[in-house]
Amino acid sequence: MATYDVAVIGAGPGGYVAALRAAVLGAKVRTPTLSGMVALTVPANASAGRTLRVKGKGLARAGGGHGDLLVSLRIVLPESGDGELAALMESWRDRERYRVRGPEYER
């Protein structure tokens, strides 16, 4: 299977990249902050667009201390397809029936 990535956007220049399995299974990944690298917990079944909070690692506050760093997850797939992943998703689609959107979007 090819490598798929979860990019952590807003955690430094260029963000941080981890394997797709981190979004599905959950993982601790090293990610950059303004004050250095930290271990960020990506929860299992994390969806794209989910925002994670890293307490005390954001911008400095006027009254002292630091705010929180908010990190958004983005799932990035390679431009070229992956037959093995496509077959896995087709098999899963046929076995698991769940709806991401309401029935009004079904035809």
Image: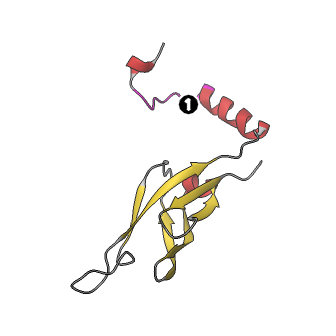
**Badge 1, how many Cα within 10 Å: few under 14, some, many 20+?**
few
The residue lying toward the viewer, choosing from 67 and 48, is 67
State the image coordinates of residue 3 (x, y, percent, origin top left).
72, 53
Residue furthest out toward the top? 107
Give, as a three-letter code, the residue at label 1: Glu
**Residue drawn at x 62%, y 62% as measured from the top left:** 18
- Residue 52 vertical placement versus 78 (above, below): below
Residue drawn at the location 46% of the way across and 79% of the way down: 34
Q: Is residue 69 left or right of residue 95?
A: left
Residue depicted at x 48% and y 12%:
107
Instruction: Give the residue at the far bottom of this rendering.
Output: 64
- Horizontal side of residue 65 vs 20, given as left or right: left
Quadrant hosting residue 16: bottom right
Q: Mark 1 points at which residue?
A: 96
Q: Is residue 58 a member of the stretch shown in magenta?
A: no
Q: Name the spot of residue 105 as percent of width and height, x first.
A: 43, 20
Q: In the picture provided, is 18 more to the left or to the right than 107?
A: right
Say which quarter of the image contains residue 68: bottom left
Using the image, determine if residue 100 lies above or below residue 10: above
Viewer-nearest residue: 97 or 84: 84
Residue 42 position (above or below residue 39): above
For the stretch drawn in magenta, the main secondary structure is loop
Question: What is the magenta range?
Answer: 94-101
Q: Where is residue 92 in the image (x, y as percent from the top left)?
A: 63, 33
Mark 1: secondary structure: loop
Image quadrant in which you'd find residue 26: bottom right
Q: Where is residue 1 in the image (x, y as percent from the top left)?
A: 77, 48
